[in-house]
Amino acid sequence: MKEDVKKVRHAGEVVGEATIPVYETITELVESESDERILNMFNKQNCVRIMGNERAKHTPTKMGKGKRWDLAFNTLTPEEAASFAGNVEGLKEFLEGDEIAARVDALIQEESGE
C-alpha cells in the first residue's frame, strides 16, 4: 500500500492535509477493511459511475469553438466551399449558422456511437 497526501480545501483556502491510503492489490484492501464497508463503498461508487454514464448520454459533447469550426468546414460540399471563394466573412457566417451546427452535431453523435 502507498499513501497519497492531498490538500484539503474549504471555501477556496487550504485548511489542512489528508493522508489517503492507496491500495495496490485487492488483498491489501480486503485485509484493511470489512467486507461490509468494501461492498458499501463499491456499490456507492458503482452507482455514481452508472448514473454518470447515463447522464453523459444526454449531455452535449463539450468541444472548443476551433474544433467545431474545423468539423463544420469539413462538412461543406465542394459546391458550398467553392461558393465562398474570396468571401471569408460569408464563409465564417455560414459555418456558424444553424444548418452547419446541425451537421456538426450529427457528426459528433455519429462518431460517439449514439
Image (cartoon, rainbow, N blue to C red):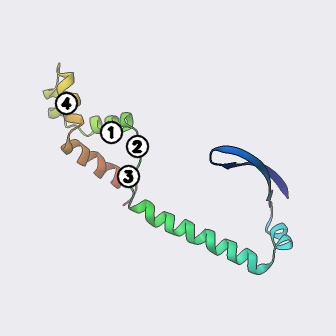
Residue closer to the observer: 7 or 79: 7
| Residue that appears at 23% across and 29% down | 92
SS for dot 1 = helix
Q: State the residue at coordinates (17%, 22%).
A: 85
Q: Is residue 23 above or below residue 35?
A: above
- Outermost residue on the top side: it is 86
Q: Disc 1 marks which residue?
A: 71
User: CB under 8 Å between callouts 3 and 1?
Assistant: no
Q: Horizontally, is 32 left or right of 106 in the view?
A: right
Q: Earlier in the sequence, mark 3 or mark 2?
A: 2
Mark 4 burial class by Cα count in 10 Å: few <14, some 14-19, many 20+: few
For marks 3 and 2, give the CA distance.
13 Å
Secondary structure category for the residue under label 4 = helix
Task: Check disc 2 and give the amino acid type.
Answer: Met
Q: Is residue 83 above or below residue 40?
A: above
Label 2 close to label 4 by CB (< 8 Å): no
Residue type at mark 4 is: Ala
Of marks 4 and 1, which one's residue comes earlier in the chain? 1
In the rendered image, residue 78, in percent from the top left (x then y), is placed at 19, 33
Q: Residues within 10 Å of mark 1 (few under 14, many from 20)?
A: some
Mark linked to residue 63: 2
Reading the image, the residue beneath label 3 is 111
